[in-house]
Image (cartoon, rainbow, N blue to C red):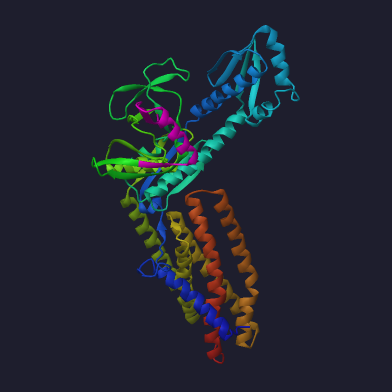
Amino acid sequence: MLYFSKIKIFLVSLVSLFFILYASSNLLKFSNELLNKKINLGLDLQGGSYLLLEIDNTPVIEQKLQNLTITIRNYFKEKNIRVNNIKLTNQKLSFSVDDEFKQIILDEFNDKESNLNPYYPRFKTHQLEIAEENNSFLINYSKQGVVELKTSSQDQALEIVRRRIDEIGTNEPNILKRGNDRILVELPGLDDPMRIKLLLGKTANLTFRFVTKSSDNSFGAEKLLYEESNEEALVSKRIILSGDNLLDAQPRMNSETNETIVSFTLDRVGAKRFGKATSTGIGKQLAIVLDGKIISAPIIRDTIASGSGQISGGFTFQSATDLALLLRSGALPAPLNIIEERTVGPDLGQDSIDAGIIALVIGFILVILFIFVKYKIFGLITNIALIINLFILIGVLTIFEATLTLPGIAGIILTVGMAVDANVLIFERIKEELKNEKNNLIAFDSGYTKSRTAILDANITTLLAAIILFFMGSGPIKGFSLTLGVGIFTTLFSVYFIARLLTAIYVEKNKEKLGLI
């Protein structure tokens, strides 16, 4: 029946007022943090930057294969088998053996039950293929292995990119995977992406190595440039410490020299290694190398056993802040290249907002006028429910601080149309019931009851489409499906609770003089 208990009336009013309050927070500023929420504007409305990054996995593949050289040397050394000419070329690890050992190695690699078994499953896990060419053996990643490695690198890079952007404080960034070697970054409100590009373009691979005077040491040496000059230094390839051992890094001002520095703190393992290296290397230069360039190379004056230190290199406070951010967020597993870049100006975003608002207002006014002319007082009830429906929808989006895009506005406009459609079905059904039923209360109740199936079928099928779009689509499509899906629930609430409650109140007070609507 059309009867609403006092508890039900109170709950409907409370829910409506609750969401209207949150919707109004987009226009008003509340002192309460719980209420002080707003809908965020997407890249197409607010303007901002769009970057498409591609991961260069070539160094990762080569590094993984290079690490296997130690495994292979150690294994065959235990077997007293001499391995010759072990080298890495074109992402293939090759080595040769004397003729007398050739068949033994073939048997070891082909027999899963052989003594090579501790390493053979590891090669399979990494999807490595082992082939023989003449007297040489080749180890390289299979296609499946490359796909797995790319996926792993992408997952790591995505997390580190997210950390770097979050630390800058960019509002509502959108960071997504594209394929298995690309990352999409959308930064609403950011119209100068240069700093972001510089931060994302650095791998942030930090190492501590000794400066040496000759290249004939057990680990080898290489010439590296200083970051602030064209001077070179010969640096040992032996890594004393890497960025993996860093716990924290912060920009600081050196009170003695008034110089900007970056102070760092090491974990327990790193502190132990650093303490040992500085105790045995007093008087030597310790090069601090970032992405293949020397930031600074201070001379060790004393043992540093505290697990903390500092990096100096003529930094400005901004560059020191960025370096500390890079070190805190960790090194990227592979270099990132920017292959596409777009900047959406705020003027374009404002034009989109204005066009969307104008379309919404015009459509809304036309719908309200049509419903009022067609259904008189019940059209007015529908319009009131329609306005409350919009407030509830905006209130839900505000609570979750959703990001509103131009397609999202289209979803809201479509919600208005669906809400009107439901009320039209109900009122047309009531007309049919009033022709055959003398009791107006029963006629109105039957109109709501008998139209329910058609309304639910239409909304459920639309909701299923919105759910599929949300999970299968991306970016703007998700924004459209989100507002449409939420709008379906708010529409059903406004039709069967708000509009029905208002209709019940009016019919109850005017049941004797109601005619056909």
Q: Residue furthest right?
A: 113
Residue 110 visible in this rendered orientation of the protein: yes
Residue 370, visible in the rendered structure: no
Q: Nearer the viewer, residue 251 or 92?
A: 251
Q: Magenta segment: does it hold 494?
A: no
Q: Please, which residue is most extreme toward the bottom here? A: 512
* Whole-percent x, y for residue 12 in the image: 53, 78
> Could you say which quadrant of the image residue 88 lies in?
top right
| 134 left or right of 315 in image | right
For the point 63% across and 65% down, the residue is 457
Residue 291 placement (x, y as % from top left): 40, 31
Drawn side of residue 33 relative to residue 268, left or right: left
Q: Residue at x 37, y 54 (%)?
A: 352
Vertical side of 308 occupied by 40: above or below = below
Residues 208 and 365: in front is 208
Residue under the point 59% across and 85% down: 5
Number of residue marks: 0
Q: Does 490 sit above or below residue 497?
A: above
Q: In the figure, 40 relative to 32: above or below?
A: above
Q: Nearer the viewer, residue 285 or 132?
A: 285
Q: Estimate the x, y position of residue 133 in percent, counting from the top left.
A: 64, 12
Residue 323 percent location from the top left of the image: 36, 40
Q: Is residue 265 magenta?
A: yes
Where is the C terminus found, in terms of image quarters? bottom right
Q: Give the magenta range.
A: 263-291
- Tell me the quarter of the image containing the N terminus: bottom right
Say which residue appears at 46% left-offset and 25% top-offset: 238
Q: Is residue 253 above or below residue 113?
A: below
